[in-house]
């Protein structure tokens, strides 16, 4: 049977088809870990501008550097699979707790301004989505935002990537398979050049490029908070032999000192109390993840359980 990647019309949440749309989101969170949003409220004009400026910035400031890196490592001529690097050109922007956009070198003023505006809209969308997840899970409104908050608010940042044409896509991945460590991830991706795939039922499935859509996926923290009801899912980027794929992934994550643990309201409903995810400080998880990103997530959860007893968990900041 052909699997259809879940595409959700966000505007339907305001009409009589709301229940159907909510059910689709619920199914996507439980069975896919991914879904694609259309009519999400971010203007097409803003998305087009972000895309134009991102591609322009890559050509002007990043492309040559990438070619030099490839030449210096002799990557065009590789004969065997490469497992310790990715065929991608990236830079990172931080928005919360405080922005570093003004400090990033080589960014033109109009690009900085547009990315700030884009981030503000994505932050709003991420918080709307977290509340929809709360509703589907039967958690009180604002619960996820509150758990993510810590003492300084959430961590929110953007990874701007370009995946240039690759002569040996079978030997070098655009991005090796991994799950995302954080909370909820909103991706604005190229609508022509594909490459993003997720793992479902042991098969790699393409995430279809669609114009003006936002792809949403769940990170490890939501798997922990839902005690495994929602899953963070392995995904990867396959490099293409022609065309450069743009990918702008924004990560709405817990604050560094936020304490993450399965929601008590969900545990109450579970018949089997034996399988409970760990409780930890988000920053500790990130330290562990840094060295194990391209490995299975289960051992990370196990490792956090053994650390669990040593974490001094103060009262949770409520906002």
Image (cartoon, grey):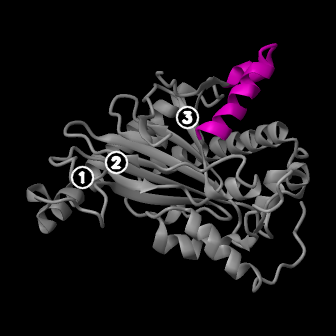
| Quadrant in the picture for the C terminus | bottom right
Residue ID for mark 3: 214
Residue shown at 87% from the left, 41% from the top: 138
- Of 147 and 293, nearer the camera is 293
Q: Nearer the viewer, mark 1 or mark 2?
A: 2
Where residue 13 sits in the image (x, y, percent)? 76, 23
Are dots 2 and 3 in contact, CB under 8 Å? no
Question: To which quarter of the image does residue 298 belong?
Answer: bottom right
Where residue 133 sits in the image (x, y, percent)? 76, 41
Any mark on residue 162, and which? 2
Magenta residues, as a range?
A: 10-32
Where residue 114 sits in the image (x, y, percent)? 53, 43
- Of 58 and 250, nearer the camera is 250
Are dots 1 and 2 in contact, CB under 8 Å? yes
Name which of mark 3 and mark 1 comes first in the sequence. 1
Residue shown at 68% from the left, 80% from the top: 306
Give the prevailing secondary structure in the magenta stretch: helix
Where residue 262 sits in the image (x, y, percent)? 79, 60
Residue 19 painted magenta: yes
Any mark on residue 63, and which? 1
Cα–Cα span, label 3 and label 1: 25 Å
Q: Residue 25 vs residue 73: left or right?
A: right
Q: Is residue 177 above or below residue 153?
A: above
Name which of mark 1 and mark 2 comes first in the sequence. 1
Q: What element carries label 3?
A: strand
Residue shown at 74% from the left, 26% from the top: 23
Q: Is residue 110 visible?
A: no
């Amino acid at each position: 049977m052909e699997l259809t990647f879940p595409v959700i019309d966000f505007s339907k949440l305001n009409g009589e088809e709301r229940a159907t749309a909510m059910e689709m989101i619920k199914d996507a969170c439980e069975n896919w870990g991914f879904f694609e949003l259309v009519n999400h409220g971010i203007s097409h004009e803003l998305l087009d501008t972000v895309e134009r400026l991102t591609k322009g910035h890559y050509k002007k400031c990043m492309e040559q550097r990438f070619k030099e890196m490839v030449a210096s490592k002799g990557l065009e001529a590789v004969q065997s699979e490469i497992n310790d690097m990715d065929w991608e050109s990236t830079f990172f922007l931080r928005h919360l707790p405080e922005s570093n956009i003004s400090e990033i070198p080589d960014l033109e003023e109009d690009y900085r301004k547009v990315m700030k505006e884009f981030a503000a809209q994505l932050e709003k969308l991420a918080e709307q989505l977290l509340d929809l997840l709360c509703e589907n899970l039967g958690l009180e409104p604002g619960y996820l935002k509150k758990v993510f908050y810590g003492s300084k608010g959430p961590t929110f940042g953007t990874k701007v990537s370009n995946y240039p044409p690759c002569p040996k896509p079978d030997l070098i991945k655009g991005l090796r398979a991994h799950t995302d460590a954080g909370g909820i991830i909103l991706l604005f991706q190229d609508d022509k050049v594909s490459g993003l795939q997720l793992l479902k039922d042991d098969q790699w499935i393409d995430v279809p490029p669609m114009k003006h859509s936002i792809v949403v996926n769940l990170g490890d923290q939501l798997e922990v908070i839902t005690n495994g009801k929602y899953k963070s899912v392995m995904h990867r980027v396959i490099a293409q032999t022609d065309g450069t794929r743009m990918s702008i992934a924004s990560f709405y994550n817990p604050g560094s000192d936020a304490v993450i643990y399965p929601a008590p309201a969900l545990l109450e409903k579970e018949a089997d109390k034996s399988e409970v995810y760990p409780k930890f400080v988000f920053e500790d998880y990130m330290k562990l993840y840094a060295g194990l990103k391209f490995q299975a997530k289960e051992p990370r959860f196990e490792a956090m359980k053994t650390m669990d007893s040593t974490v001094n968990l103060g009262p949770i900041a409520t906002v």
